[in-house]
Amino acid sequence: MRMICAITIAVFVVSVAKVGAQEGKITVRVLDESGVPITNAVVHAGFATAIKPGWGWGAGKPNRVEGFTDSNGVCSLQGSGNGGSVGIAAFKDSFYGSSGYQVLFTNLIGTVERKWQPWNPVIQVVLKPVGNRIPMYAKNIVEASVPVRSTPIGFDLIAGDWVTPHGKGQEEDFLVTFSAKPERVYTNWYGSTPRIHSLLDYTLTISFPKEDAGVVPVPVPLQGGGSGLRLSREAPGSGYVSVIQKRVYQEESKPPHTDICKDQNYFFRVRTKKDDKGNIINALYGKIHGDFQFDHLGKLTFTYYLNPTPNDRNLEFDSKQNLFKNLSSLEEVRDP
């Protein structure tokens, strides 16, 4: 009798484990930029798991599985998780990694062997080959206070600082103007309860004093996955605009408005010189990952990469050869 009970309990435990497994399967096809399959690329898949009731706050750790692509650049992975999604990344030596891909499952089928749907969707991932990585000036500018309001202040990209007398910079690569209108307050009522609201209105203007210097805005969606090499390998030769402006404000009884866009990136050209015929004979090129971030106090944040070689538009950064030394952990840049 005890033997029968033990067997019954064991079968029950196995059945419960299967019901809770919630299996998912995906197939990843890895290609290069020309559409050629990449063999032996490692593919990671993290099947999301929600934390169990009573275990505290937050999300559970994804169940990670990995494999390698075959001669057709294909890798199929299967794993379990109750979070309803799977994150995907692919890597190979001599290529930039590609990550951030996600599949959202829509429903479950089955009673004992529970399977996420869609079952085995195909996700295409493109890996960009590493080209000519070079030393660059790369720095995170984190909440740098604009020294003066409503007055253009120069920023030196090689010094990584404001120009004198506000910093150690000598060359005005671009000018920063921060202005803010006086804060306004209004009150509305929810029943008998007053609600006080602050209305902010502040603007950041980035301008380039040298002729034909400026930026080329390049939006790159952050959702849906993408290469570690976010932008093109080379800065464009034309299309630069000399002024961009960002405004953040709120009007009474309306939602706040912001021109800051996390998907926005930029190429830039500075320190331009021209010959007698108006041709550019000298310029430095670089890129900015993300938009210019700033708050109502005039604290500015952005990340930039500057190629120090005149007229060289190559922007593949060698993170082991940052020309800035002794940066703080917040200032360090690790991505290409």
Image (spheres, helix red, strand yellow):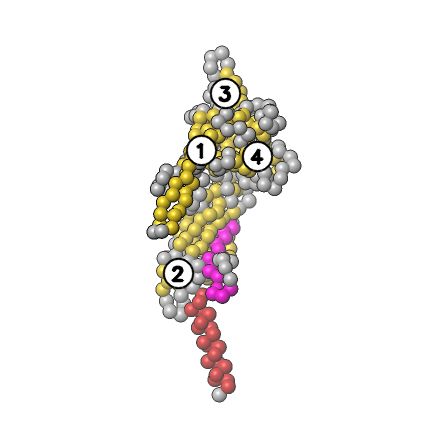
Does residue 183 lie above or below 54 as drawn?
above
Which numbered circle lies on residue 116?
Answer: 2
Viewer-side residue, 300 vs 71: 300
Q: Earlier in the sequence, mark 1 or mark 4?
A: 4
Marks 2/1: CA–CA distance: 54 Å
Q: Is residue 21 visible?
A: yes
Please, what secondary structure does the residue beneath circle 1 have?
loop
Q: Earlier in the sequence, mark 1 or mark 3?
A: 1
Quadrant of the image occupied by residue 93:
top right
Q: Residue furthest front?
A: 192
Q: Which residue is at a point 65% across and 36% down the rendered structure image? A: 326
Viewer-side residue, 302 vs 109: 302
Viewer-side residue, 229 vs 190: 190
Viewer-side residue, 267 vs 10: 267
* Residue 230 coordinates in the image, percent (x, y): 48, 39
* Residue 20 coordinates in the image, percent (x, y): 44, 67
Q: Which residue is at a point 55% across and 30% down the rendered structure image? A: 147
Q: Which residue is at a point 46% across and 21% down the rendered structure image? A: 212
Please, what secondary structure does the residue beneath circle 2 have?
strand
Q: Nearer the viewer, mark 1 or mark 3?
A: 1
Amino acid type at image mark 2: Trp
Which quadrant of the figure contains the C terminus?
A: top right
Q: Nearer the viewer, mark 2 or mark 1?
A: 1
Amino acid type at image mark 4: Ala
Which residue is label 3 attached to? 210
Which numbered circle lies on residue 182?
Answer: 1
Q: Nearer the viewer, mark 2 or mark 3?
A: 3
Looking at the rendering, the stretch of residues picked out in magenta corresponds to 41-55
